[in-house]
Image (cartoon, coloured by chain):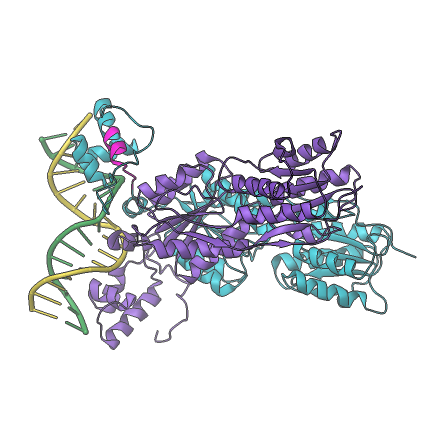
Chain colours: A cyan, B purple, C green, D yellow
DNA sequence: CTGTTAGCGCATTCAC
DNA sequence: GTGAATGCGCTAACAG
């Protein structure tokens, strides 16, 4: 009975005798101390003699005591969990964001609540509400609705927008410089002599999509070319739709000589369509993507793309939101990470 | 003042006046009702007159009241969140599991707590502990340590093992039939005349890895071939290591004519090495994988593989754990989903 | 149908 | 150094 296991012994129904979990009161009784002393001994906050501390800890261990974070949070009026709202876990990019966020949260001593909003603003709001009810310490969100972050901030939840940013006051953001990255990708194509460059993009109205669109236009204009909106196809976050759009592009009388697919799913769709059409990349058509994904270096030729470090983005967002906690009035801060144009084999000089 | 906004008004410091959030007491006061009546009106549990209900709801809305799930859980001694522990969110397969789990949890009215254990048993235990402290209603885990599920069950947390199963009493499991799937993949290769078939696998000692290994052996034996453990390479969950292992395989005096890579990362590593070596698939070498991933249908030829529906697996796991809640004594149940051998172009008759 | 009372598990004054 | 008392926000008896 004197031995100390390194974990709560699992054998008997010790966790409170069928159904009831051990509470701090049980521990106190077992250790022959008061609840408050026990609390101090366990949390390390406040004075307690070494012997008592020892007795208490042993008792806790042998009872399989696990503190109740809900009760603690209720009492302390503080929380140690962070809500992370991502658009689509099935997409590598978002999965990596979540992985980075989760990792950093753990490093900082927080637990991650994750929700996949399936790119639906309704789901997004529902998840945010659930987080708020759970009294998370902060939220990281890749917003699909413009209103979500404001809603959170109005409820005094420290919030950071990740990947997309609607720029509301009080809401920090973490993203790459989409304008410049997009501009660089387009400029690369222009430099290779391409004149008809199609842009495949999810949408062109808000934040990230908007900036990539503007970067594209800027690069064209800088080269004295006239941007033509007929070359811009907004096909959402869907590889299948992107394939369809690409096929339509290729059927044109004067098809583009290069395609810039502004996210990984669109690049995937474009790649499939281009191959089905029997075109050779980059001889017949140049392709450049956005985001990195395993397949981009597995196919032949490898796909040139704008690489953003999704893990680092997720980490930065959590760091930022944790920094924000308790500093509600600090001015909005935009964290901009680098994105790198990674040239591989899928771009070449324009034909003819 | 009579209008009802469809959301809590964001404009003023209504959420409790700088710092203090509105509580049910505030709502009660504003509505001129008692706390219990207010509680009933808000939760829909118990009797309350329509007019009072209305008044309360209006008051709640205008105060931006959001119930505190922690306090409610404390009182009700129940929780509405589910913990999901996955090995590696960066891996499509696990990301899909998480996506499916998250989706189903939401459908069933639960919030998902997600943790990425980074395939480390230490992280896994820490995350499980955090979940327990948060008093989750149940846990879904892709266990890396054999002890984790037992630990959870000993703490009376309904638990289901996903993808891997250590088969402990009281722990349900959800997975595909790895033995049969692996056997089928290997048999396919054997049927094509291959005699030297290498198995690239994470490990061969436990559960999933073990069964895939056994399925492989079984198929060889059924064909009268003698399994040779020199053809079995355990290289963990790491594409780079798999590449290295594949290179070593190919350098042999009598290299294999086919490789069965028993998970998506290993298949990726093998593919890279095979291509670097200048080999043509499937003419020089047949390759078959496990798990599906976007790249497998993007490369040329597409990679034949055992497809498991990861989303469905995640969904099933959550359904199962929810079913378990409140039924601690029900016998252990194994849920086995189908896995399908998807033949694409990466396998062909053995050379010579 | 509504209000009063009590207590979930914990941390924190404040005496002793 | 330790313990008794109090209350976080909420819901569930139980009376009225």
Q: Check the picture and name the quadrant holding the C terminus of chain A.
A: bottom right
Image position, residue C10 (x, y; %): 26, 41
Magenta region, main secondary structure = helix
**B207 or A122, which lies in front?**
B207
A52 versus A93 height, above or below? above
A282 versus B217 height, above or below? below
Q: Residue at x 29, y 31 (%)?
A: A44
Image position, residue B87 (x, y; %): 50, 42
Image position, residue B24 (x, y; %): 27, 60
B344 versus B153 height, above or below? below
Residue B35 relative to residue B232: left or right: left
Confirm whether residue A169 shows in the render: no
**B107 or C11, which lies in front?**
B107
User: Residue A279's quadrant in the figure?
Assistant: bottom right
Confirm whether residue A20 shows in the render: yes
Residue lying at the far front in this picture: please name it: B224
Residue C2 relative to residue B20: left or right: left
Q: What stretch is highlighted in magenta?
A: A58-67
Q: Which residue is drawn at 25% across and 37% down?
A: A12
**A136 or B294, which lies in front?**
B294
Image position, residue B285 (x, y; %): 75, 42
């Amino acid at each position: 009975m004197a031995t100390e296991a390194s974990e709560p012994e699992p054998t008997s129904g010790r966790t409170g005798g069928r159904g009831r979990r051990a509470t701090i009161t049980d521990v106190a009784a077992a250790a022959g101390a008061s609840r408050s002393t026990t609390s101090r001994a366990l949390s390390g906050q406040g004075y307690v003699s070494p012997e008592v501390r020892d007795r208490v800890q042993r008792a806790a261990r042998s009872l399989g005591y696990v503190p109740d974070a809900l009760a603690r949070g209720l009492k302390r009026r503080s929380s140690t969990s962070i809500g992370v709202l991502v658009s689509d876990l099935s997409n590598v990019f978002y999965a990596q964001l979540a992985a980075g966020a989760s990792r950093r949260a753990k490093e900082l001593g927080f637990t991650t609540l994750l929700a996949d909003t399936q790119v639906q603003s309704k789901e997004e709001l529902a998840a945010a509400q659930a987080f708020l009810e759970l009294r998370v310490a902060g939220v990281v969100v890749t917003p699909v609705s413009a209103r979500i972050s404001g809603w959170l901030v109005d409820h005094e939840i420290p919030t950071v927008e990740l990947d997309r940013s609607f720029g509301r006051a009080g809401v920090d953001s973490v993203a790459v410089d989409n304008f410049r990255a997009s501009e660089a990708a387009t400029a690369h194509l222009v430099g290779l002599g391409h004149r008809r460059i199609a842009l495949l993009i999810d949408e062109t109205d808000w934040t990230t999509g908007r900036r990539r669109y503007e970067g594209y236009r800027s690069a064209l204009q800088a080269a004295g070319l006239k941007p033509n909106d007929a070359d811009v196809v907004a096909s959402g976050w869907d590889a299948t739709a992107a394939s369809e759009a690409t096929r339509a592009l290729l059927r044109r009388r004067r098809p583009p000589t290069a395609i810039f697919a502004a996210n990984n799913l669109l690049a995937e769709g474009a790649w499939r369509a281009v191959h089905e059409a029997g075109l050779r990349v980059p001889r017949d058509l140049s392709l450049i993507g956005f985001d990195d994904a395993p397949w981009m270096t597995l196919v032949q030729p490898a796909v040139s793309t704008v690489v953003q470090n999704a893990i680092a983005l997720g980490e930065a967002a959590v760091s930022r939101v944790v920094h924000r906690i308790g500093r509600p009035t600090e001015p909005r801060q935009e964290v901009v990470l680098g994105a790198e144009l990674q040239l591989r084999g899928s771009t070449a000089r324009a034909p003819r």
